[in-house]
């Protein structure tokens, strides 16, 4: 059993980590921290955790956390900048679910997040935790930047096309839709049921923080800078992301279905569905699976890729656990094999 | 007061027509028909219509319907083919909310709807009832084909760009999302709350019946056949369509905001929102308004247009009443000026 | 045209008042106030109000408000205490949608609302604005306390039984369920879509502020103090209250259906449904109607009454306008006759 | 490993059984049947079951099913009547999730279900599968009648009060609310998202099939026939039942909290929450837990009990597996210990 800690265990990615780690056969959840709820027992915050043991939230203390083998940050941006270095220095692995180490360029980070990068010296060893792209580096890493939710779905969807140079890189479109939990567990007007239910809208069309993250990965893969239009939308539901991706093929003699199936043949959490499929977000709810379908409407030169994930699992906490499994030499799917509850 | 009849008044477009016509100051709703519910009073079917008078559903009878000045078809496809001719012959105007007269090419119609066109002789006088495009022909028409819900949002969104030749016609993308009421009031598995709630998916990616309708209008406007990728999605909510449209600009010296505002300056139901806006479906719920916003992310050459409508009002019954107003010389907005209920 | 003002027009009862008064044929909406949004145009806050004129929110100023014939308070409790007196002194009628003047006993008020009553001297002239009970006093009143949402549904449901002494007053049960908009437009955790959607719970079982208000009315009507168990619940939806009421009949020779129909024969907004009916909240959404059904399961001695209202209309803003109509001598239903949007 | 079969595995209780049995460590799911979907692979019906093996639906065949150690019926009523006897005769245990064997009186059954009872000879050995009441008989049983969803919540809520004679048996009230999945996976109008979403109503007030089932259990426990008013309601959500129970205490010197905690001390799936609690349906979603809270508002003589379950798990398929565990000597909680996904 390894010892794990969670910093900021009271948000939606936090409670999802709690659910996954409490059930993980190789993990002892040793420390959970929350400044605002220090002293409260685990079960007081979330009605689904009654009966799941006697853990008590405590204020974050590096000395206590450093006794863990691995510490997860499920915090607002900036917190991991301040604390990750000290934990790493004491030999504790760090898996950061926030955006703090996702962008390799600290200046770019500062521009999108509105504050100076707080730990640029750690960037060289931070590994972008998308296992389907970086399985080997993750296994060797001490510091993981877990990808954002939109970037996970969009990158997995575009990857086979971009890696093999099959599409015009200057005209990529990612029309993505997310459940409200993507906005976090914050008391903000726009996330009220009365505002977000029975409603639908796009947001952030002029620019969204996940755009540079997606571009960074696709640029690295393609060896050149792509042109991507990314439009996020807010779905009137709790969980799930569906990304609908559009690209122009630059050759017509490729079996796209085969390209996708081969690319992800070794990826236990990417399910390339049969031709003609339409993945549903509910089919992956609560699971770490990304379901993909690839279409070429009317046999034209536009390829449409559909990518469905649970934004809190494959888009956050499940992917974090998948990274942990790889870092610690556990089977990649350990503790992540539940079946989605449906309906 | 003019006399109006509704054929097939028991579906969702039917009950919406009932709501609008019962409150219309110039209309006496004289006949409502339903084969399945003949003999039942109006208020027995829909809990919102209690206290709205003593109308009784009757079986459709051309002789009775021909006493109306105008008859609306809110029926499955094929029904208007069979009955419209006789009504027109007796001098009754026909406004068809079904797909029966939307496509000018009867062969194309037959291919998409899986049966031969039943009234090709009427096609020459059928007018496509998009008032923002065909105001004058509508005012002279006897037979109106009310546009489909997706085509209304998508066409209004693309129209200024296509009319003025501002975009590459070969690479249009329409990513559209609709509430479940778009599927009609039919007891079908996919429309169950347990299937469609807390879920999101694309459907019909290989091809959807509204595609040829959109292409027909855009071709006519552009003078050439465009390339359009259209992907519809099912939203976990009752009402509303948001279409997110993508196109590549072929010139950069145009003030797009101005283009849209001028194009729709005389359109009382098209609201071009200020730069930077994100229209919401709830803001048009129950109203005949189409809200548009035009974006150019990063000042690049991709234009993103957002178009929000209520699929049952501007996408069906409200647009039908708007057509009726124009045909009968009433003010265009008569009976269509309610404020959306929000939240 | 009379001049009306709204204090606190940015909450959910405020925007509902805006919707109703902007469409009211006898009202000129002259002043809308909001401390937090002073200077902003009407349409900036709510997407459904675009195109509804050029009103601008201003900070509340009694001198300006006193130019109105009637002023509505859609404010947190305490605000009307502070301002109503001055408005009344200047001859302006006051319709208070908050709880400030609902309880005649200021000590009791202080106990339930956690602060001293701020205007006990005004209580003698405050009229409880339930038109179905107090039509005459309302017509003469200068100061109206609009009933709470739960009290409206529950009182209308129990009234015929209690007035005629048909039930055991010591064993009344009101099991009531409300949409989330009843909690107001406040950024609070429990009202988030992610907390309240796909979920159901009771709350406030030990005691809820609407209990003393209901008891006050029923006591007054019965001439004695009843025993009432009131349990509110939070529905995973935006609008609507259904109250399910239980009482034990103390006689069996009464035609309950007839009792209800006669009691409300002159009430234009109370719809006593036919025997065997089950009113739905969607059937009254956006309208000022209360739908009632009365059942006696198994012909036993328990009577079950179902009462459905829209909590923001008959339970707040619509009832406020109904009161205004009565106070100013307009037809009771003026501006309140829209048909619910369904589905 | 024991071999299990499911008859009628395509409804909502069926897919929930699939989810639970596929993950059960002691079960090999050997046969799944469906007349309508015979020949289709498991994963074709439900998007959450992709990758869960190669089972194929087959037409029901007693010879094949009799090779199982236990067979579950997740069928409409009447089917288990026809097939259970033969399976029992061949030594296969039967767990029936339908209503076929819930009522001991076949005449009463026929009256409520509208057809003659098809297997009255099997009734003497049918055990009502509520483990918290019948743990020992279940362990010995060959034929289990799994309780209905409403009866499970209501009976567990009333049981301690009725067993100990603490309340007036003539005035019990059960106001219960269920998600739409309680109506099953049937293409019926009332279960459409457009009909059931953003809406709330009572139904079946004159009488519901679960009433005689609840009365049978309470009568047996009390030794006399109680008077119960049961009103079910339809919640605008997928899963979950909350029952709000009202009873009049006939003594005031009892510590109700203690009564409940002691009654369920040995019941691993009944969670008696601390005083003042309000159980939420989402806290038990996807789990076999029943959460209870007991209140005595104002320290009066009315007791209010809140009982929350997932209607498809503790109210159906989870309870069925709990019965199987007891019948086969497995730990009661085996395969039933997942944490609810929240939010």
Image (cartoon, coloured by chain):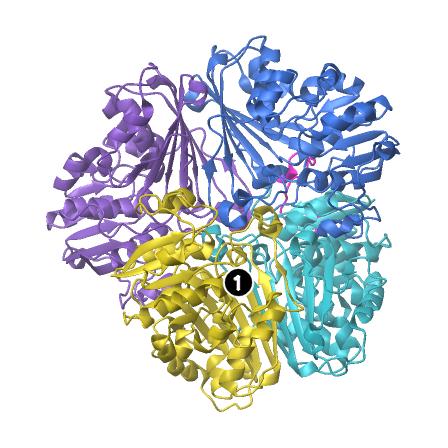
Chain colours: A cyan, B yellow, C purple, D blue
**Spot occupied by residue D270 in the image (x, y as percentages of width and height):** 65, 27
**Spot occupied by residue B1 in the image (x, y as percentages of width and height):** 24, 61
Q: Residue at x 80, y 17 (%)?
A: D140
Say above or below: B162 vs B47: below
User: Is A52 one of the magenta-colored residues?
Assistant: yes
Chief secondary structure of the magenta portion? loop
**Spot occupied by residue A256 in the image (x, y as percentages of width and height):** 78, 72
Total marks shown come to 1
Judging depth in this view, the residue of C148 and A65 nearest the camera is C148
User: Is D148 one of the magenta-colored residues?
Assistant: no
Q: Which residues are magenta?
A: A47-66
- Quadrant in which the N terminus of chain C is drawn: bottom left
Q: Residue at x 80, y 56 (%)?
A: A91
Say above or below: A21 vs B84: above
Which subunit holds the residue at mark 1?
B
User: Do we see residue C66 in this rendering?
Assistant: yes
User: Do we see residue A113 in this rendering?
Assistant: no
């Amino acid at each position: 059993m390894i010892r794990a800690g969670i910093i900021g265990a009271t948000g939606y990615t936090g409670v999802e980590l709690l659910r996954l780690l409490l059930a993980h056969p190789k993990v002892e959840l040793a420390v959970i921290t929350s400044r605002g709820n220090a002293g409260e027992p685990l079960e007081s915050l979330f009605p689904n955790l009654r009966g799941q043991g006697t853990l008590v939230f405590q204020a974050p203390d590096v000395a206590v956390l450093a006794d863990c083998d691995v510490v997860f940050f499920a915090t607002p941006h900036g917190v991991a900048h301040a604390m990750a270095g000290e934990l790493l220095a004491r030999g504790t692995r760090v898996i950061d679910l926030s955006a703090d180490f996702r962008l390799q360029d600290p200046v770019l980070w500062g521009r999108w997040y509105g504050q100076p990068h707080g730990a640029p010296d750690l960037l060289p060893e931070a590994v972008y935790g998308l296992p389907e792209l970086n399985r080997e580096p993750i296994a060797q890493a001490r510091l993981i930047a877990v990808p954002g939710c939109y970037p996970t779905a969009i990158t997995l969807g575009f990857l086979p096309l971009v890696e093999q140079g099959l599409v015009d890189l200057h005209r990529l479109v990612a029309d993505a839709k997310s459940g409200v939990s993507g906005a976090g567990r914050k008391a903000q007007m726009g996330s009220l049921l009365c505002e977000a239910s029975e409603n639908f809208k796009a947001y952030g069309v002029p620019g969204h923080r996940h755009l540079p993250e997606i571009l960074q990965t696709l640029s690295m893969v393609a060896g050149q800078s792509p042109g991507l239009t990314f439009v996020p939308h807010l779905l009137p539901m709790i969980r799930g992301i569906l990304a609908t991706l559009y690209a122009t093929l630059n050759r017509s003699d490729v079996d796209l279905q085969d390209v996708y199936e081969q690319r992800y043949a070794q990826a236990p959490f990417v399910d390339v569905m049969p031709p003609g499929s339409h993945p549903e977000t509910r089919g992956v709810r609560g699971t770490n699976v990304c379901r993909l379908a690839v279409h070429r409407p009317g046999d034209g030169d536009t390829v449409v890729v559909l990518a469905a994930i649970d934004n809190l699992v494959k888009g956050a906490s499940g992917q974090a656990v998948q990274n942990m499994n790889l870092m610690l030499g556990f089977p990649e799917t350990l503790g992540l094999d539940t079946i989605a509850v449906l309906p």
